Amino acid sequence: MLVAFNCCFCIKRPKQIPGYEEPTVLAAETPFTVSEIEALYELYKKVSNSIFKDGLIHKEEFQLALFRNRNRRNLFADRIFDLFDIKHNGVIEFGEFIRSLGVFHPNAPVEDKIDFAFRLYDLRQTGYIEREELKEMVLALLHESDLLLSDDVVETIIDKI
């Protein structure tokens, strides 16, 4: 009888993905509601199994979700992926995904949004946005927008910022 009970328990228990955390726990730590987290879980499952069937979001899957092309290089996408990868292990787990997306929620504190934007531009993670980091980001933005500006104009933009 005990064997049958254990077997039934195993069959009914849903298979969780790596790094899965309960929506109620995540809702207590983020601006999201439980129902928003459950909806984001469906999105997460789709993205995290788009290339590698392991339930983790790899950089290629992240870029595929953003650009419909896993090979396109984009400095902003790389930086956002790096900021979402809180454990710095090359993948984004579900808890990291929710906590990181929380900064974009309308109810997220403005201070969190400012901190995220600062960390996005602080490429070398020195606690300062250096001129070369700013230039690299401006050039990447111009490139993504297919805008060609002379070096003098780019330098003027950087000086003004």
Image (cartoon, grey):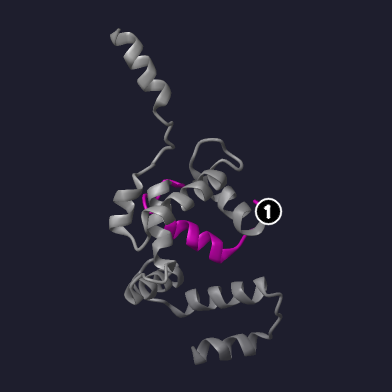
Quick check: is 144 in the magenta stretch?
Answer: no
Q: Position of residue 112 (x, y in %)?
A: 34, 71
Circle 1 residue: 69
| Position above or below: 60 against 107 | above
**Based on the displayed image, in which of its 4 quarters is residue 74 positioned?**
bottom right
Q: Nearer the viewer, residue 80 or 34?
A: 34
Q: Nearer the viewer, residue 2 or 69?
A: 2
Q: Nearer the viewer, residue 14 or 68?
A: 14
Judged left or right of residue 54, residue 124 is left
Task: Describe the element under mark 1 as helix, strand or loop.
Answer: loop
Q: Position of residue 108 (x, y in %)?
A: 36, 70
**Based on the displayed image, in which of its 4 quarters is residue 15 positioned?**
top left
Q: Position of residue 67 (x, y in %)?
A: 65, 59
| Position above or below: 140 against 14 | below
The magenta stretch spans which residues? 68-92
Q: Position of residue 73 (x, y in %)?
A: 63, 59
Q: Nearer the viewer, residue 39 or 123?
A: 39
Q: Residue furthest top?
A: 1
Residue at the spot x=63%, y=52% of the render? 64
Q: Is residue 96 visible?
A: yes
What amino acid is found at the position of numbered circle 1 in the picture? Asn
Q: Quadrant of the N terminus?
A: top left
Residue at the spot x=66%, y=71% of the render? 144
Q: Is residue 85 visible?
A: no
Residue at the spot x=42%, y=22% of the render? 11
